[in-house]
Image (cartoon, grey):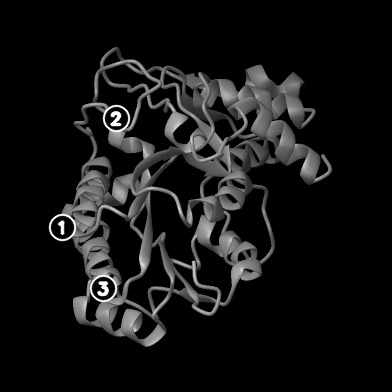
Amino acid sequence: MQQNQPILLTGVNGFCASRLRAHLQSFGPVVGLSHAELDITDRSACARVLAQHRPSVLIHSAAISDMRACESNPERSYGVNVLGTEHLAIACAETGTRMIHFSTDQVYGGTGSSGPHREDAPLRPASVYGRHKLEAEERILRVSESFIALRLTWMYDFRVRNLRTGRNLLLLCQRAICTRTPLTLPSATPRGITYVHEVIRQIPALWDAPGGAYNFGSAGGLTPYESARLIFKLAGAENLTDDLLIPENEPAGTYADLRMDCGRAAEQGITFPETGEGFRIAFDQYGW
């Protein structure tokens, strides 16, 4: 990465990017772009912004990540998550910019096989969001094999003033505890769930990494329901667990094993704590 060139960050007001921006500033100037500043569905606007800033790296986090929104409006999802991503990839190729694209573990939904999944596993995503994210990966890697797609897990953080919190598991548990409102969570879908700051601190290790897809996050065999039980315990609310946490009855064949094998990232010196250990790290850092 060239120190005198900026890092461009799309979706800067999003959950991960709003936190990532501050971390990246130690590596050089950072230009954060919101939807108001760049509509990625406009190919000419993407080309213009990349030509103006000529960044060394583009970290593309902008997306429609609400899976229900993607299902209800697949055309809009396709325009943003697939075509918008491709527009940026083409503009990056024209300016010699390295692209790091945020993808998702939902590409493994519908595989019908048990995890942990490797990046080269056969894929047939069941959701619109997963299918569109996979197609976006394929399109950017056709533009340049040096580009990177990060298959991210569900992430979480405590509430931080002036930063987007999102619908993350830690916040859902906090709300349930504070309001004594029952929380229903999937109990048959094992997946990694990652402390967002663990993702953030590892991204600079990708500056010179080989291109392609990377599973990027905490491994673990816990379901969201099991993870929530651990959060309740760490929060000192274990006595409320049975009253407030309700396991969702997922009929056989309707759930997917989203666990990922992160061995390829580990080859680059990138490792993540297991899901349970990540929760303990987060609680320690925030002084709980």
User: Label 3 amino acid?
Assistant: Ala
User: Label 1 amino acid?
Assistant: Glu
Q: Earlier in the sequence, mark 3 or mark 2?
A: 3
Q: Is residue 22 above or below residue 206?
A: below
Q: Nearer the viewer, mark 1 or mark 2?
A: 2
Q: Mark 2 Cα within 10 Å, few/some/many (few <14, many 20+)?
A: many
Measuring 22% from the left and 68% from the top, which residue is drawn there?
A: 90
Instruction: Identify the disc placed on residue 91.
Output: 3
- Mark 2: secondary structure: loop
Q: Is residue 50 above or below residue 16?
A: below
Q: Earlier in the sequence, mark 3 or mark 1?
A: 1
Seen from this angle, which residue lies furthest right? Answer: 287
Measuring 53% from the left and 52% from the top, which residue is drawn there?
A: 203
Q: Quadrant of residue 120?
A: top left
Residue picked out by circle 1: 75
- Mark 3: secondary structure: helix
Percent position (x, y) of residue 1? Answer: 49, 66
Circles 3 and 1: CB distance less than 8 Å?
A: no
Percent position (x, y) of residue 181? Answer: 61, 34
Seen from this angle, which residue lies furthest top? Answer: 252
Asked if residue 265 lies left or right of residue 48, the reply is right
Measuring 82% from the left and 39% from the top, which residue is drawn there?
A: 288
Instruction: Identify the disc placed on residue 138.
Output: none
Closest to the observer: 281 or 208? 208
Residue picked out by circle 2: 109
Q: Earlier in the sequence, mark 1 or mark 2?
A: 1
